[in-house]
Image: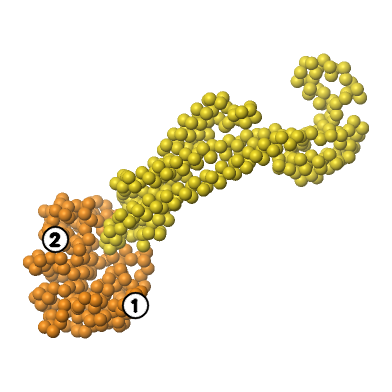
Chain colours: A yellow, B orange
Amino acid sequence: MKAFRILTRSISDGFKSVFRNFSLSLASILCTTITLILVSVALVISVNIENFTKEIEEDLSIVVFVENSATPDDIEQIRSQLLSIDNINSEEIFYQSKDEVKTEMQSESEVFDAVMSQWEGDDNPLKDTFQIKVIDIEQIGETAEEISKIDHISSVNYGEGMVEKMVNAFKWIERIAYGAVLALVIVTVFLIINTIKLTIFSRQREIGIMRLVGASNFVIKNPFIVEGMVIGLIGSIIPVCCVILGYTALYDYSSGHIFTPLIKLISPMPFIYFVALVVVIIGIIVGMIGSASATRKYLKV
Amino acid sequence: MKFIKIEDCYKVYKNGVTATAGLNLEIDKGEFVFIIGSTGCGKSTLIKMLYREEKPTKGKIIVGGVNVAKLRNSKVYKLRRKLGIVFQDFKLLPKLSVYENVAFPLTSMGLKKSQIRPRVIKALELVGLKNKIRSYPNELSAGMQQRVCIARAMVNEPKLLICDEPTGNLDPETSKEIMEVLDAINKDLGTTIVMVTHDKDIVNRMKKRVILLDNGVLVSDELKGKYKAHESI
């Protein structure tokens, strides 16, 4: 109960202090705002990239064509050899005999159906196939080469280098975006340290008196930490609005995908609230870390 | 067990200045003690060590059973809550009213409003300022401000009141009033008072125990002491 009273008091003191030294706080709030806008842009970009690269990766598979001369024993042999390759997802190896391929293609199009209905038994020019998914998309080329060395394989097909290069590039963009977020967060921490430092200096006399009349460190420090958190919270208002309005507008304008239908945007509904929440939490935590380290440095308690 | 016990206390500042050198001192509960001496004799350092603003370099300082010399920074507030401090420059918060200033130690302890109010009123009655409750420090005379400071020091009902030249900024007439207040606190509440002063008249008139320091050493310790003619101040 006592701790609760001290806490509510420091919360109200922290709020008051933000508005009492508003010109000072404003600088920090604006810096936090700018940082958090960039943070949220970076966050939106990287989560989207992560999302659609994952989708592309899931769609991307290697198709292995087996020679027509292969016996059922040979096919079993191929399967076990495929299983022994590390980069192949052992649960995602699907075998289709050429008859199954034929039926599937027939069901997809009437033209195919008309042509293929004449193929029977050995007349069928199609080949038995394995469809394989890899674990690490960046090594798909090496894996395909390894597969082609297996006996009785006629050819190996995959995204022909284009797709995985694109995925690779996007992964780099994602890493850079995360790096930028981290750097910006650190810069903001220092800005908030500075603001709180100035507040502490301008209130040094008051703090000294508090210590002399027996205020505990907890009571002295808390208002400053709350002040930092309030700065972070206020600083996150505009970025949150930007994310919610901006992303919805972008999604509506681009009708859900950018440049090509391959690059799909995440549907905004739960996503923007998730980003907004993360931005608010980052703002508050950054404010807290900044003011906590400022009080530790400059409050000699 | 004495209330305050100082044993072989040395204090050397970082710049090499020796403030106290092997000081031994005992003060009983309920005593009224003046500490006098010329500027730089170590009296301010001595009382700063009592409320743990300074740490002794060597030796023991025991206040109410606690070795202050070994008290950690984070625990200092526990000591400060048990004693009251009156300053030469009052150290009131200008933005708070008299009531809020006196209530300040209690609110920072997290007491309930209903617990704080009667204690603040009582402390202000003690110094005769109950009618100035809503004023702000800059609306009061220096003497009144000092009384507010005393009320704030007494609001915790401490056993020890430390006064650092409480009359240093006041005219003789006001000083006399302040001393009456302190004397009443000492007599009526039994609070131990340790007071540093330069004021010859006050020391001579009050006839209390007087401790004279010189260069960090105890020179004389007399009950009902007085400033001697040859002592310079």
Give percent across and percent down for residue A105.
Answer: 79, 22
Q: Label 2 belongs to which residue?
A: B142
| Residue type marked 2 | Ala
Quadrant of the drawing holding the C terminus of chain A: bottom left
Is residue B3 in view?
A: no
Q: Label 1 belongs to which residue?
A: B16
Give percent across and percent down for residue B133.
Answer: 15, 53
User: Which residue is at a point 61% across and 28% down the rendered structure image?
Assistant: A259
Callouts 2 and 1 on one subunit: yes
Which image quadrant is residue B180 in? bottom left
| Residue type marked 1 | Gly
- Nearer the observer, A148 or A121: A148
| Subunit bearing disc 2 | B
- N-terminal of the two: label 2 or label 1? 1
User: Which residue is at a point 30% across and 82% down the rendered structure image?
Assistant: B21
- Nearer the observer, A225 or A5: A225
User: Which residue is at a point 13% across and 80% down the rendered structure image?
Assistant: B227
Is residue B107 in view?
A: yes
- Looking at the rendered structure, the secondary structure element under dot 2 is helix
- Looking at the rendered structure, the secondary structure element under dot 1 is loop
Q: Is residue A31 above or below residue B160?
A: above
- Nearer the observer, A190 or B150: A190
> How much space separates mark 2 and mark 1, taking CA atoms?
36 Å
Give percent across and percent down for residue B73.
Answer: 36, 66
Question: Callout 2 environment at 10 Å: few (<14), some (14 to 19), or many (20+)?
Answer: some
Give percent across and percent down for residue A115.
Answer: 84, 17
Which image quadrant is residue B189 in? bottom left
